[in-house]
Image: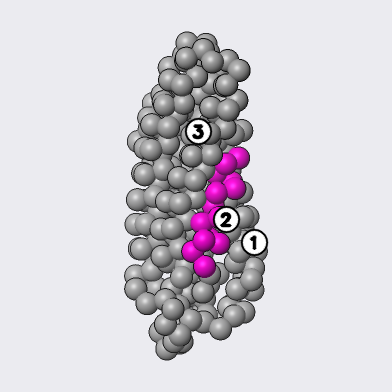
């Protein structure tokens, strides 16, 4: 790390930084595309494995796939988000990534894999089941904010606002998607009637809100630790 506060002294009290803001949106977009696409492949692989009729091994297979999905989520999303977070506070990359893995594991274990297993056993389309499960797991977004806030509480006095920001972003986006679904069932991604592209867009739509909130939460005036951001 390059120990220098000069770059942060010019940051306004609001924490605004256009470059970091757009980096947050861009990095999260890349991460969400990777996570959902590779996650879709993992779900199909898991379905094929479960289709081998190894009933006694269903739980093991599901656990392995869910763990891989969670590691993917934590690794991709956490690592890319950290590229922005590190510019404001000296949070270790491993710590930030780990904060992303827990909520992702819950999403895979409680929502995605049960839906994939049920679809496989009933002969339904697995890709549709994954789409619906991925849509429903969006509700766990605020849990991700809570997990990350536990890390941020060590470096900023505004850490609790990060929980509210994530909850608000998900509620606003879900409400917007719901209103669109009233116009056309083809847009009803929240009940699985939409498309995988809409799931991507739903995730990406939260990033402008969380990006602005992150910059405020990590504004220099709110930090409780010496600032030694990493250079680009």
Q: Residue at x 36, y 44 (%)?
A: 33
Residue located beneath label 3 in the image: 65
Q: Is residue 191 visible in this depiction of the protein?
A: no
Q: Is residue 71 magenta?
A: no
From the viewer's perspective, is 62 left or right of 180? right
Q: Nearer the viewer, residue 149 or 201?
A: 149
- Residue at image position (39%, 50%) is 31
What residue is drawn where x is 43% and y is 20%? 48
**Contact? badges 3 and 2 (CB < 8 Å):** no
Which mark sits nearer the N-terminus, 1 or 2?
Answer: 2
Picture quarter containing residue 84? Answer: bottom left
- Pointers 1 and 2 in contact (C-beta within 8 Å): yes
Query: Which label is found at residue 150?
Result: 1
Location of the C terminus (image quadrant): bottom left
Answer yes or no: do the residues labelled 3 and 1 have beta carbons within 8 Å?
A: no
Residue under label 2, please give it. Answer: 99
Residue 226 at x, y percent in the picture:
56, 83
- In the image, the segment drawn in magenta is 92-106
Q: Secondary structure at mark 1?
A: helix
Query: Is residue 114 positioned above or below 105 on the image?
Result: above
Q: Residue at x 49, y 50 (%)?
A: 74
């Amino acid at each position: 790390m390059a120990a220098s506060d000069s770059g942060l002294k010019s940051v306004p009290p609001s924490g605004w930084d256009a470059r970091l803001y757009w980096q947050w949106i861009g990095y999260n977009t890349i991460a969400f595309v990777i996570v959902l696409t590779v996650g879709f492949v993992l779900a199909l692989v898991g379905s094929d494995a479960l289709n081998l009729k190894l009933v006694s091994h269903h739980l093991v297979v599901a656990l392995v796939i869910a763990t891989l999905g969670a590691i993917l989520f934590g690794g991709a999303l956490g690592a890319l988000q950290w590229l922005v977070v590190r510019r404001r506070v000296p949070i270790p990359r491993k710590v930030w990534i780990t904060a992303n893995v827990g909520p992702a594991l819950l999403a895979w274990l409680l929502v995605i894999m049960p839906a994939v297993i049920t679809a496989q056993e009933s002969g339904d389309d697995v890709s549709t089941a994954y789409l619906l499960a991925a849509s429903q797991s969006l509700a766990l977004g605020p849990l991700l904010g809570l997990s990350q806030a536990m890390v941020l509480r060590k470096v900023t006095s505004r850490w609790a606002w990060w929980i509210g920001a994530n909850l608000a972003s998900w509620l606003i986006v879900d409400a917007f998607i719901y209103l669109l679904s009233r116009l056309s069932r083809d847009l009803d991604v929240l009940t699985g009637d939409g498309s995988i592209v809409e799931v991507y867009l739903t995730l990406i739509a939260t990033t402008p809100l969380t990006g602005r909130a992150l910059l405020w939460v990590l504004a220099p005036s709110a930090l409780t630790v010496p600032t030694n951001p990493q250079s680009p």
